[in-house]
Amino acid sequence: MADVIIIGGGISGLSAARLLDKAGLDVLVLEARDRVGGRTHTVRDPAYKYVDLGGSYVGPTQRRVGRLAKELGLEFYKICDSPNHIMAFKKLWRPYSGFFPAIYNPFVLLDLNNIHQTMDRMASQIPVEAPWKAKDAERLDSMSMAQFIEEVCWTQFSKDLLSNMCRLVVCGEPHTLSALFFLWYIASAYGVDRLMSVKDGGQERKIHGGSMQISERMADQLKDKVKLSSPVDRVEQGDSKTLVHTADGQTYETRYVISAMPLPIVNRVKFEPPLPDKKLQLIQRVPMGCVIKTMMYYDRAYWTEKGYSGQMFTDGGPVLYTLDDTKPDGSHPCIMGFILAKEAVKLTSLPAQDRKTALAKHYAECYRIPELKNPINYIEKNWMAEEYAGGCYVSNFPPGTLTTFGPAIREPFKRLYFAGTETATVWSGYMDGAVQAGERAAREILHSLGKISEDQIWKDEAPIPDFEEIPFELSFIEKILPTVPQFIGILVTSAVAASAVAVHKFVKPFY
């Protein structure tokens, strides 16, 4: 009989198992796949050495995954972020550096500046541990991001850009996402800049050899306490013990259970007694994001030779966003591209070869490099077809879900506890959130056993020495720029004042 059985051998489940094992408890991890890693998936092949087809990026303020990786003897490298990124959006083509390219339309410039600051300000007012308690939670949760975009944006360029940001950040269409959820997601990542940036942001680094090594090395430490190809289909909770049944007919006895499955996948397991009503309602309402992660390999890094970073933000094609995925030694030149949201759903009907052709054509046009039409290798992963994930990167919360059912997300049920990156309060959807959630669930059990006090369940994490957490600061100009309505008001006021001066100067009094 195990003290704790963990359902799911991804980063979250294995983080929980590792902590409990160190505390002296007998643990068993049941993983449905024939591999560990969950939504991280590193594939090895001589053609490209290794490639991360799932979660891979790490950056400053992601302290837990940084600490864990170092404890496991893994090393990070910074991905290419040279100054010249490409914006190929709404007929605008421009190399740029920083967060946005130079925009010469004053209305668009002011609109983007205001949206950026508005989202950061609103996100900062949302409690990351309980977004449903935010001051304006009910209104924001009743509103889709499509409605939010219409409310805060004045220019069509800004509306389209923010819509694509929704698709990129959580792999969902704006009309399907709660505004409260999206703003909370920003809050959990410490702001728009930290979430979206490469340098000093969530996409700054990767792991030498691939991110699945985090799970593999934890599994190695646990040795025979991890069982693969063991999908759980039923959990029976009794007064003093729980039985966990797998699809291959095995039954395991335990005192506690941790579910480290993606929220929608929890619905595939039969629980006796049934889960509480709010938990059941929650897991029926939070679909996974839609994404196909693609890797296009070339004989040379043509974009680097042209002085480009490989980072591109675009529209009008199969891919919205790319990053350089060349190995740190310069070998295996590669562009990583995400096919996202409705575009991912649409393109699943095509053969992989047709997606490859469409992407190569798109890259050649957007980078303005004809050689990119001729890749030497291509690999992709359609996460929507992943049986035990159902999508990536994270569960999406439609309007009305967080305020009504959100409080049930981490709520234990008898001897059943819940982990998984969706239940994190920081960096949800990232590997860092998975670590926080797994370790928190493990400490909840340790508290239940009387081994730690309640105030030790949630633990702050010390900064990682190598991960310099440089704050993002607004420039003086950004702070004082008016909104579009304010700018129009200034123009109207100036025009009226100028007209008044002209009338006074050139029209003689009739008296």
Image (cartoon, helix red, strand yellow):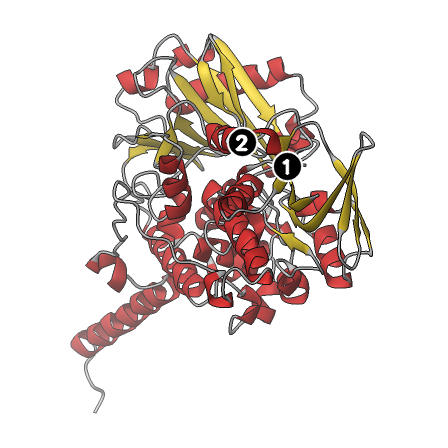
Instruction: Give the residue type at disc 1.
Output: Gly
| Camera-side residue of 4 and 357 | 4
Residue 185 visible to an observer of this rendering: yes
Seen as rendered, the residue at the extreme bottom is: 511
Name the quadrant containing residue 473.
bottom left
Q: Position of residue 35 (x, y in %)?
A: 61, 26
Left or right of 201 in this view: 428: right
Left or right of 403 in this view: 123: left
Instruction: Give the residue type at disc 2.
Output: Ala
- Image: 403 above or below 265: below
Q: What is the quadrant of the C terminus in the image?
A: bottom left
- Image: 246 above or below 436: above
Q: Position of residue 55 (x, y in %)?
A: 50, 34
Q: Position of residue 117 (x, y in %)?
A: 36, 59
The tag earlier along the polypeptide, 1 or 2, is 2
**Circle 2 residues within 10 Å: few <14, some 14–19, many ≥20:** many
Could you say whether the residue bearing mark 1 is in a helix, strand or loop?
loop
Query: Residue at point 62% right, 53% down?
Result: 397
- Image: 243 above or below 216: below
Residue linked to disc 1: 391
Residue linked to disc 2: 219
